[in-house]
Image (cartoon, grey):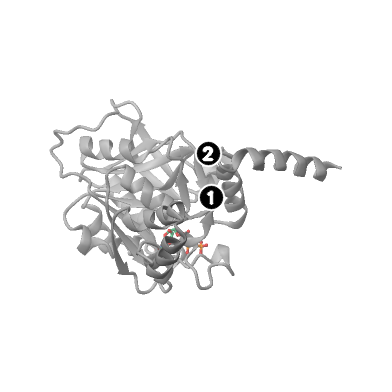
Amino acid sequence: MSSMSNSEFPPVRKAVIPVAGLGTRFLPATKATPKEMLPVVDKPAIQYVVEEAVAAGLTDVLMVTGRNKRPLEDHFDRVDGLEAALQAKGDQEKLQLIRESSELADIHFVRQGDPLGLGHAVLKGEQHVGEEPFAVLLGDDLIDERSPVLPDMIAGYDRTGGSVIALMEVPHESISMYGCAAVQETEVDGLVRVTDLVEKPDPADAPSNLAVIGRYVLSPEIFPLLHRTEPGRGDEIQLTDALKAQARGDGHGVYGVLFTGERYDTGDKFSYIKAVIQLASRRDDLGEELRTWLKEFVAGLED
Ligand code: UTP
């Protein structure tokens, strides 16, 4: 699917990144630090996510922050003292590393106030986003840069004017950990129409094995729907509930793009550890050494 430049709908230009969750699955690390600042190898998870948005052409980024936004703001800002010290040492390589994040994008911040759910966090972006489509990226999902999904999602929006979600096929018994989509094929390869959404269904009741992952391209139709969404599961305003209303409603609807690339989950401790090992083992600078060590380590476990 390629992007249609002659879309009748306004272009997707902005990204909203909600980072105001409590991160309770990762305590105590997340007591004073947002979970999006946890390093995945040597970069905080949030930097991968901003890089992904920028790679898809979305250089206007709004972060919806919570009680501990300082580390996030600082990470995407210049750090005079550190830069001066590296400059004095003549360490250009590290200087470049710390400057990268501050030169990436045009980053804005808004406070969520009370963490009343992902839908509520997205609603906090309404004023900044205005009457435009926009992307939402969650920091729990890291998408491998070699298999990006946002470009196809943006192309899906350009074609339909509806919201577009990223769907990943998961083993049937695991669907209860995700939002699940009921879908119909469209005439476009790789693009399905979403007819319904169910949050964390019992596998017996799940309409498909298609799990919703943390990338969305939302049409501005979502805002009035979010305003009308009552708190649902966990007493939180769920984005899924507003999307369900959009899928069932008579606007431009909801579509899904099938994601078949590599994705790393950093939301809980075990999947985070796996993500760090997977990503590090692919790195040019660390991979070979890590893989050799891992084999020895695993052999030692079996003894
Ligand atoms: P999660 O469901 O992963 O919740 O949020 P959480 O609070 O971050 O983490 P746990 O489950 O307590 O460990 C999904 C995404 O929505 C954001 C989170 O930052 C995360 O990116 N979020 C969630 C908000 O910004 N505000 C909220 O009120 C809730």
Q: Is mark 2 within 8 Å of ligand 1?
A: no
Q: Quadrant of the C terminus?
A: top right
From what the image shows, is residue 236 above or below residue 295? below
285 to 87, vertically: above or below: above
Residue underneath mark 2: 170
- From the top left corner, tell me how far across and down residue 244 is, in percent: 34, 50
110 with respect to 46 (left or right): left
* Amino acid, disc 1: Met
> Identity of the amino acid at label 2?
Val
Residue 20 can be seen in this image: no
Please tell me in which quadrant of the rendered image residue 46 appears.
bottom left
290 horizontally vs 233: left or right: right
CA separation in Å, label 1 and label 2: 10 Å
Image quadrant for the N terminus?
Answer: top left
Q: Position of residue 140 (x, y in %)?
A: 47, 53
Q: Is residue 101 left or right of residue 270?
A: left
Counting residues from the N terminus, which is met first, the one under dot 1 or under dot 2? 2
**Image-based side of 300 in relation to 110, left or right:** right
Judging from the image, what secondary structure is the residue with disc 2 in?
A: loop
Which residue is labeled 1 in the image?
Answer: 177
- How many residues crowd around disc 1 within 10 Å: few (fewer than 14), some, or many (20 or more)? some
Q: Position of residue 95 (x, y in %)?
A: 42, 56
Query: What residue occupies the far right of the structure in this picture?
Result: 303
